[in-house]
Image (cartoon, grey):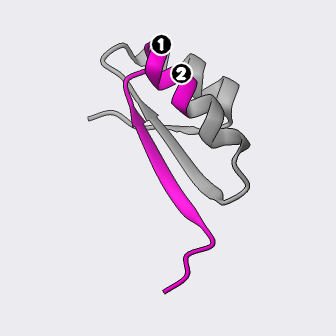
């Protein structure tokens, strides 16, 4: 089964999470990107940069 569109959730907006979110945002197959972090402000900042949604809970 071929999958052309993918969704990615990045848990953690630290150094590695930021790198992964930036790479995912540039990938043509990624149609949904979500960011989550213990610090809501940090998650919102990275989501704004990457064009992602913020999820917490």
Residue 25 locus on image (x, y percent):
67, 40
In the figure, 2 relative to 51: above or below? below
Left or right of 32 on screen, residue 25: right
Q: CA distance from mark 1 to mark 2?
A: 5 Å
- Near-viewer residue (11 or 48): 11
Query: Magenta residues, as a range?
Result: 1-20
Magenta span includes 15: yes
Q: Is residue 2 magenta?
A: yes
* Residue 7 x %, y %: 51, 57
Residue depicted at x 66% and y 31%: 50
Describe the element under mark 1 as helix, strand or loop: helix
Q: Position of residue 17 (x, y in %)?
A: 46, 24
Mark 2 lies on a secondary structure that is helix
Q: Which mark is residue 15?
A: 1
* In the image, residue 25 above or below residue 42: below
Quadrant of image for the C terminus: top left
Residue found at the very far bottom of the displayed protein: 1
**Which residue: 69% across, 48% down?**
27
Which label was assigned to residue 48?
none
Residue denoted by label 2: 18
Q: At 54% from the left edge and 62% from the top edge, which residue is drawn?
A: 6
State the image coordinates of residue 42 (x, y, percent, origin top left): 48, 13
Extreme residue toward the left, this view: 57
Picture quadrant where residue 13 is located: top left
């Amino acid at each position: 089964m071929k999958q052309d569109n993918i969704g990615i959730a990045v848990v953690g907006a630290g150094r590695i999470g930021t790198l992964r979110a930036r790479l995912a945002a540039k990938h043509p197959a990624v149609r949904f990107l979500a960011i989550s972090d213990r610090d809501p402000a940090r998650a919102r900042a990275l989501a704004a940069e990457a064009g992602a949604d913020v999820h917490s809970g």
